[in-house]
Amino acid sequence: MTLDLRIGDLARSAAIPAATIRYYEKIGLLTSPARSDGNYRRYGRGDLDRLIFVRRAREIGFSIEQVKALLDLSDRQEEDCGTVMQLAQEHLAEVEQKISDLTNLKQRLSTLVSSCGGGKVSNCRILDALSPSEGKSERA
């Protein structure tokens, strides 16, 4: 089945805003589409498939540059999959580092919150901990 979609139809089909599609064209994730006689963008099945690929890759946190690399690799079907696996492993390591950083942040913030005994802002332990003079209340 041949598709002939305008940008709004493509956006609905791929569950991506039209503005994002235009941005992806601008940065080269999508090729500039053919234009109708009325100068409307016209998209086909390949455009929809590529856009869904990009959306899914972005949903699992791949950066724009990583998505570009994955698209480039997906266009070379006979290549070894090792490069794709390496990209995914690098991304997984980045995600694991972010989880570790967020876990540390959570612990620090939990400690701060549990140190708050209420009362007046002038005696707020959370604000004291954030102040450059750490621990000394200069608010009055």
Image (cartoon, rainbow, N blue to C red):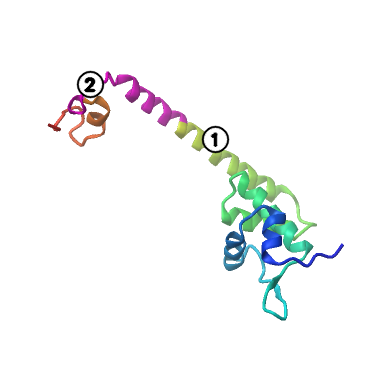
Residue 74 image point, x, y percent: 73, 56
Q: Secondary structure at mark 1?
A: helix
Q: Residue at x 72, y 77 (%)?
A: 36
Picture residue at 72% right of the left edge, 55% below the top: 13
Taking 69 as reference, is 119 above or below it? above
Quarter the C terminus occupies: top left
**Number of residues whose C-alpha sits closer than 10 Å to that of mark 2, classed few (under 14), some (14–19) or many (20 or more):** few
Could you give the CA–CA distance between mark 2 and mark 1, rounded to whole angstroms? 39 Å
Residue for badge 2: 119
Task: Please identify the quarter of the rendering in which residue 85 is found.
Answer: top right
Q: Position of residue 99 (x, y in %)?
A: 51, 33
Q: Are marks 2 and 1 in contact (CB under 8 Å)?
A: no
What residue did someone put label 1 on?
96
Give the total number of marks visible in the rendering: 2
Q: Amino acid at mark 1?
A: Glu
**Residue in the foreground of this view, choosing between 21 and 38:** 38
Q: Is residue 120 left or right of residue 84?
A: left
Where does the N terminus fall, quadrant-wise?
bottom right
Residue at x-position 50% and y-position 36%: 97
At label 2, which amino acid type do we have? Gly
Q: Magenta segment range?
A: 103-123
Is residue 117 positioned above or below 75 on the image? above
The reply to whether the magenta stretch includes residue 40 is no
- Judge left or right: residue 3 versus residue 88: right
Dot 1, crowdedness within 10 Å: few (<14), some or many (≥20)? few
Task: Determine whether the residue tagged by mark 2 lies in a helix, strand or loop.
Answer: loop
